[in-house]
Image (cartoon, grey):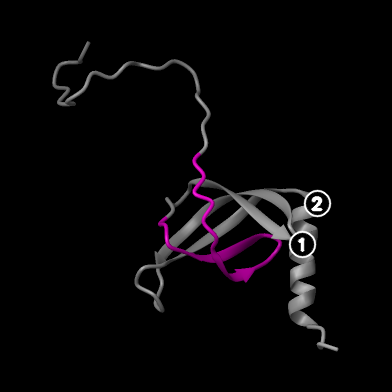
Amino acid sequence: MRAPGDRRAQVRFEVFGAFWGTFDTGDAVRVVDLSRHGALIETHQPLAVESIQSVCLRLDGQPALADARVRHMRASHTDTKCFLVGLEFLTTSTAFLDGIDRLMVDRAFPTEPA
């Protein structure tokens, strides 16, 4: 039943309670900046500001997960088909934080090839 003034083409039904769902594109992104608190990433998909996104960090084939809130988004100045997205990490696992620490050490002190 439609409410007066409702101009939707299809009938919609009222839902009581919360429904959970996920949407995963699995797209790899380029990490521009990274810390234990968040990241700046470059992606081909725009992400809604204030949305919660799942982040998967893979090191040596092992995944580590975190939830992140999109804090800001803008078009990339280097590629007009890309977006720069600022993420704030909300929940992180020990494996995720250890992975970030390892990446930062590897970048700060790169090993010389033998």
Residue at 50%, 24% (x, y): give it.
Answer: 19
Residue at 15%, 16% (x, y): give it.
Answer: 4
Q: Give the label, 2 or 1, closer to the camera.
A: 1
Amino acid type shown at disc 1: Asp
Q: Mark 2 points at which residue?
A: 94
Residue at 55%, 50% (x, y): give it.
Answer: 69
Residue 7 position by quadrant: top left
Q: Is residue 18 left or right of residue 82?
A: right
Q: Which residue lies furthest to the front in this view?
A: 114
- Determine if the magenta segment contains residue 24: yes
Question: Where does residue 40 sit, x and y in percent of width and height?
Answer: 55, 66
Q: Quadrant of the C terminus?
A: bottom right
Q: How crowded is mark 1: few (under 14 residues within 10 Å), some or many (20 or more)?
A: few
Tell me the SS state at disc 1: loop
Magenta segment: 23-46
The foreground one among 91 and 22 is 22
Question: Where does residue 18 sit, x and y in percent of width and height?
Answer: 50, 23
Question: Where does residue 25 sit, x and y in percent of width and height?
Answer: 49, 49
Q: Residue furthest right?
A: 114
Amino acid type shown at disc 2: Thr
Q: Earlier in the sequence, mark 2 or mark 1?
A: 1
Residue 76 position by quadrant: bottom left
Tell me the SS state at disc 2: helix
- Determine if the magenta segment contains residue 43: yes
Question: Where does residue 102 sit, x and y in percent of width and height?
Answer: 79, 68
Q: Distance between the residues labelled 2 and 1?
A: 16 Å
Is the C-beta separation of discs 2 and 1 under 8 Å? Answer: no
Q: How crowded is mark 2: few (under 14 residues within 10 Å), some or many (20 or more)?
A: few
Residue at 48%, 48% (x, y): give it.
Answer: 50
Circle on res. 106:
none
The foreground one among 86 and 95 is 95
Q: Name the residue under label 1.
A: 60
